[in-house]
Image: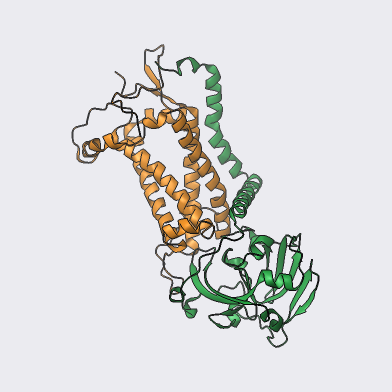
């Protein structure tokens, strides 16, 4: 016979009334601007936390055959203000600072003296489009070793010639496919793609792939998260 | 699979009220709680998803870009891409949590046998569809849910699962590269995610039509748990 018959007392009625309200409470909380902002920030934070949990240091992003690579002229150029911030390529150096043993100015030749990795990997934009590009460069992990960076530091923080800036958690930076990229499509990095040096981290979303790098800092606390992140985009956004 | 018995599964409770109206306790608070929160989060996911889609309303290449459809601003939630992502990444967890709680509860309470579409229901789908769509004779109802209903509810749960799995691939196509490759990669996962949304909205539409046609009692039952004069009681 009905087993819930005895439990249909006023006690469960009260509980029922309360629970009926819970979805309304959720809606209510999201209609108050201050509460909504905090809840949404928490939600994005939780998603980022989950992505970071799922990140595996040695799990490689898929690589693609040359035939699968998007033609260079079909590789969309996304910049936040100018396609070419007018970097003087002759005089360019990368300023390295922070928690490193050998801070200073590093030339492109010094970066290129380290082993080169060239791979066809997928570039995914937060807007939803994706391309497969051919990228060549120095592993960030090799360069960090070269400058004597503290591998236990938490972040890399980069600044760019066009005032863009980005941060990268150390685990993602040390990933074997993460590059200081100076070549695309086997050619020196073109101006609109970030000449002379950009980030190429296949385990991260597009806006993390900062172009026209000018400085690189190794630090535990970053001054800002990133150009888009500081406007409300997720700060970690691992793929 | 469901139990082998062919007798209808009795509803949880049945009692006589003062008015001698027959009333049945159909939905436990867990089911109702999950139903409404999941409904809410589904609409938030759809609205914010459409706003995200507005950023690149195509499933083709970026160059040349051929917009498939421009979602009107009035259907989109979040105001801009970043805002929509915040809503999407927040309510995804409410959507997943209520889904998991619901399925777990149904399994533990063995209530899943009521809505789960099983092999023996296959034969009853067409007669019921004929009744609804082509005014055929209404088949005798022997269970709480008719075969067509069971099919709809079961597919809704399957679609819910698919929406989450395709969504996870869109969020982390590298960490879940195996799942991504099953779907044809990130690019295709985006299309599947959209297709699942369309199917879910179709379910919601059918569900709403049935609630409107079959009246207030069903709606109240999902709200309070109790149903007056249920059609399956003698």
From this view, report whether residue B57 is shown above or below residue A119.
Answer: above
Residue B206: x, y in percent? Answer: 34, 42
Quadrant, the C terminus of chain B = top left
Q: Is residue A178 left or right of residue B182?
A: right
In which quadrant of the rendered view does residue B183 lie?
bottom left
From this view, report whether residue B224 is shown above or below residue A62.
Answer: above
In which quadrant of the rendered view does residue A235 lie?
bottom right
A171 vs B101, nearest the viewer: A171
Chain shown in orange? B
Res B208 visible? no
- Residue plotted at (55% across, 82% down): A186
Chain shown in green? A
- Residue plotted at (54% across, 30% down): A19
In which quadrant of the rendered view does residue B121 lie?
top left
B17 vs A224, nearest the viewer: A224
- Residue plotted at (45% across, 16% down): A5
Residue B116: x, y in percent? Answer: 36, 35
Res B162 visible? yes
Quadrant, the N terminus of chain B = top left
Residue B211: x, y in percent? Answer: 36, 35
């Amino acid at each position: 016979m009905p087993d819930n018959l005895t439990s249909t007392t006023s006690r469960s009625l009260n509980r029922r009334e309360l629970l009926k309200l819970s979805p309304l409470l959720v809606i209510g909380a999201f209609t108050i601007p201050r509460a909504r902002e905090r809840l949404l920030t928490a939600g994005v934070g939780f998603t980022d936390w989950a992505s970071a949990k799922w990140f595996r240091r040695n799990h490689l992003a898929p690589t693609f055959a040359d035939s699968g690579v998007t033609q260079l002229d079909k590789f969309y150029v996304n910049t936040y203000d100018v396609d070419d911030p007018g970097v003087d390529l002759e005089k360019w150096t990368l300023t390295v600072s922070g928690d490193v043993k050998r801070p200073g100015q590093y030339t492109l030749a010094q970066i290129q003296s380290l082993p080169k990795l060239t791979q066809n990997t997928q570039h995914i934009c937060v807007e939803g489009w994706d391309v497969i590009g051919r990228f060549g460069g120095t592993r960030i992990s090799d360069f960090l070793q070269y400058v004597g960076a503290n591998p236990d530091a938490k972040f890399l923080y980069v600044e760019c010639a066009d005032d863009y800036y980005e941060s990268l958690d150390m685990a993602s930076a040390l990933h074997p496919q993460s590059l200081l990229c100076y070549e695309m499509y086997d050619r020196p990095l073109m101006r609109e793609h970030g000449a002379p040096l950009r980030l190429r981290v296949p385990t991260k979303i597009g806006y993390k792939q900062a172009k026209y790098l000018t400085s690189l800092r190794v630090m535990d606390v970053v001054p800002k998260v990133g150009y888009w992140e500081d406007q409300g985009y997720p700060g970690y956004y691992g793929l | 699979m469901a139990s082998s018995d062919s007798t209808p599964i009795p509803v949880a409770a049945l009692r006589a009220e003062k008015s001698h109206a027959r009333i049945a306790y159909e939905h436990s608070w867990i089911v109702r709680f999950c139903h409404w929160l999941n409904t809410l989060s589904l609409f938030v996911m759809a609205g914010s998803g459409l706003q995200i889609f507005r950023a690149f309303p195509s499933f083709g290449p970026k160059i040349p870009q051929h917009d498939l459809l421009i979602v009107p601003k009035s259907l989109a939630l979040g105001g801009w891409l970043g805002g929509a992502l915040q809503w999407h990444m927040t309510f995804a967890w409410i959507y997943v949590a209520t889904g998991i709680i619901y399925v777990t509860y149904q399994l533990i309470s063995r209530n899943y046998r009521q809505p789960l579409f099983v092999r023996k229901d296959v034969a009853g789908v067409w007669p019921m569809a004929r009744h609804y769509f082509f005014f055929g004779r209404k088949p005798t109802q022997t269970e709480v849910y008719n075969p067509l209903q069971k099919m709809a509810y079961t597919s809704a749960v399957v679609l819910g699962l698919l929406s989450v799995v395709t969504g996870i691939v869109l969020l982390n196509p590298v960490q879940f590269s195996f799942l991504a490759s099953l779907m044809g990669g990130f690019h295709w996962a985006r299309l599947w995610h959209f297709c699942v949304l369309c199917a879910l909205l179709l379910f919601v539409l059918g569900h709403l039509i049935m609630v409107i046609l079959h009246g207030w009692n069903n709606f109240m039952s999902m709200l309070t748990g109790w149903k007056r004069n249920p059609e399956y009681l003698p």
